[in-house]
């Protein structure tokens, strides 16, 4: 009885015996593809993955979808002809943007290797086996497809503006994280392979689309390797890169750089220094109108406090704002900021009068002491989560509901593709051990 070969077996037959001998036998690969309105691309993407990947190594594909169009339905239709399992996880709330979608996919991955790539075909699927093979051969935890290593090209970047932005973002990231990004020439790349054992999903706090940067800084994978690739033209649709994503990238850099308590304290101090600008400007404006300098000082100080609070909210503690209502946070910050002066004056008097310290060094010492106390109090009394209460219980319940909902999405998507999963399983022995 004759059987009809699957697309994977056709592709396997096209390889010579010499080529097959050179193919490594790593564990299977999970290809994670975040999507947002990529309906025009997903069919061709799955076709190219079918041609390029399952002939070399077993695979599964997970789409994590934030679309508002029919992308999920078109993925499921195209998946019927794929010789590997295809899962669609649709998120109603796109928490963390593209990076959050990738983390969601990583939690669902079952393979030794995870490859992350975009859906617009600017990342060639034919490179997936080479990324994994390079990781196996070099014993690497992370393999980056780089546009900036020898043999790579950024040809698909449209226009000088996008090229300049890409280069500038790369330089800025490598300057801020020289150790974590050592050996990575293209930290902005969205195309890479990473061992599942090197990923600590719970440690990741993605913001926007630069998930490789997040992984490299927070998970610190061991050995890193690179594979050159030519950045292709977009197959269909329009780029999702916007000025808003650029701002999210800058906030992401700040959050990563201020992850440690010492770094947060330094950033807190720098933000406090910038507060002198609106403070002095307001003081000058008020005194010029004829206001007495004492009430002018008080009012001008409030403007400086408001400026500092805004920057701290947006740049330093953005991921902790949900623990208290904005009015509660504002009131607490204002009290702490104004209490700084009330505490500093008696401390200076104590240092000068009781301990005989000169006025200038006493002032410096008092500034340092009150600064440290203010930072610790701000973090502990405003931005640390509450230990108990209805709000935290509600948050936990909400997360639990979202988790159950995503599990239903995964179960439903897998059931629609049970035939292709069975085909992949039956074809695996012919390809060799995973």
Image (tube, helix red, strand yellow):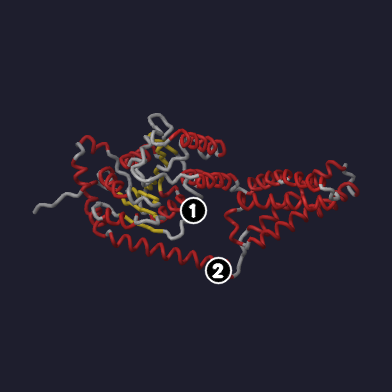
Regarding residue 220, the answer to whether it shows in the image is no
Q: Is disc 1 surrounded by few (<14), some (14 to 19) or many (20+) residues within 10 Å?
A: some
Horizontal side of residue 163 vs 312, given as left or right: left
Regarding residue 321, the answer to whether it shows in the image is yes
Measuring from the top left, give residue 249's x and y in whole percent.
52, 45
Q: Is disc 2 surrounded by few (<14), some (14 to 19) or many (20+) residues within 10 Å?
A: few
Instruction: Compare residues 214 and 299 and report the one nearer the observer.
Output: 299
Which numbered circle lies on residue 80?
A: none
Q: Tell me where residue 155 sits by quadrant.
A: top left
Total numbered badges shown on the rendered structure:
2
Measuring from the top left, give residue 11's x and y in whole percent.
21, 43
Measuring from the top left, give residue 43's x and y in whole percent.
29, 49
* SS at badge 2: helix
Q: Residue at x 55, y 39 (%)?
A: 177
Residue found at the very far front of the displayed protein:
289
Instruction: Compare residues 216 and 232 and report the one nearer the observer.
Output: 232
Tag 2 residue: 393
Q: What is the distance, in whole Å, between disc 2 and disc 1 at their CAs?
A: 22 Å
Give the mark nearer the N terminus: 2 vs 1: 1
Horizontal side of residue 328 vs 5, given as left or right: right
* SS at badge 1: loop
Q: Tell me where residue 385 sits by quadrant.
A: bottom right
Q: Foreground mark, 2 or 1?
A: 1
Measuring from the top left, give residue 416's x and y in whole percent.
28, 61
Residue found at the very far top of the displayed protein:
150
Q: Residue at x 42, y 36 (%)?
A: 158
Tag 1 residue: 96
């Amino acid at each position: 009885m004759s059987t009809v070969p699957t697309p994977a077996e056709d592709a396997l037959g096209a390889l010579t015996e010499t080529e097959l001998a050179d193919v490594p036998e790593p564990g299977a690969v999970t290809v994670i593809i975040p999507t947002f309105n990529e309906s025009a691309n997903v069919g061709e993407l799955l076709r190219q993955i079918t041609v390029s990947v399952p002939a070399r190594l077993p695979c599964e594909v997970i789409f994590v979808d934030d679309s508002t169009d029919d992308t999920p339905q078109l993925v499921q239709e195209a998946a019927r002809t794929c010789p590997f399992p295809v899962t669609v996880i649709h998120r109603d709330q796109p928490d963390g943007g593209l990076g959050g979608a990738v983390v969601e996919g990583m939690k669902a991955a079952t393979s030794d290797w995870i490859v992350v790539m975009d859906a617009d075909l600017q990342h060639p699927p034919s490179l997936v086996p080479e990324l994994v093979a390079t990781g196996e051969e070099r014993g690497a935890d992370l393999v980056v497809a780089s546009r900036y290593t020898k043999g790579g090209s950024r040809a698909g970047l449209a226009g000088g503006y996008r090229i300049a932005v890409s280069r500038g973002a790369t330089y800025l990231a490598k300057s801020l994280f020289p150790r974590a990004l050592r050996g990575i020439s293209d930290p902005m790349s969205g195309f890479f392979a990473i061992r599942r054992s090197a990923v600590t999903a719970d440690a990741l706090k993605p913001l926007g689309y630069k998930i490789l940067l997040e992984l490299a800084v927070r998970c610190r994978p061991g050995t890193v390797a690179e594979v050159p690739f030519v950045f292709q033209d977009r197959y269909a649709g329009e780029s999702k890169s916007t000025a808003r994503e650029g701002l999210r990238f800058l906030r992401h850099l700040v959050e990563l750089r201020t992850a440690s308590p010492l770094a947060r304290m330094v950033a807190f101090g720098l933000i406090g220094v910038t507060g002198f600008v609106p403070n002095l400007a307001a003081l000058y404006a008020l005194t010029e109108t004829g206001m007495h300098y004492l009430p002018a000082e008080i009012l001008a100080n409030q403007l400086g406090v408001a400026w500092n609070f805004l920057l701290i909210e947006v740049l330093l503690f953005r991921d902790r704002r949900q623990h208290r209502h904005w009015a509660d946070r504002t009131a607490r910050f204002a009290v702490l900021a104004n209490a700084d002066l009330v505490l500093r004056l008696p401390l200076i008097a104590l240092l000068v009068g009781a301990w005989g310290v000169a006025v200038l060094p006493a002032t410096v010492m008092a500034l340092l002491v009150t600064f440290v106390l203010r930072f610790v109090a701000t973090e502990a009394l405003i931005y640390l989560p509450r230990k108990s209460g209805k709000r935290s219980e509600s948050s936990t319940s909400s997360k639990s509901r979202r988790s159950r909902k995503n599990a239903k999405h995964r179960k439903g998507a897998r059931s629609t593709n049970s035939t292709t999963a069975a085909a992949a399983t039956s074809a695996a022995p012919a390809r060799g051990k995973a």
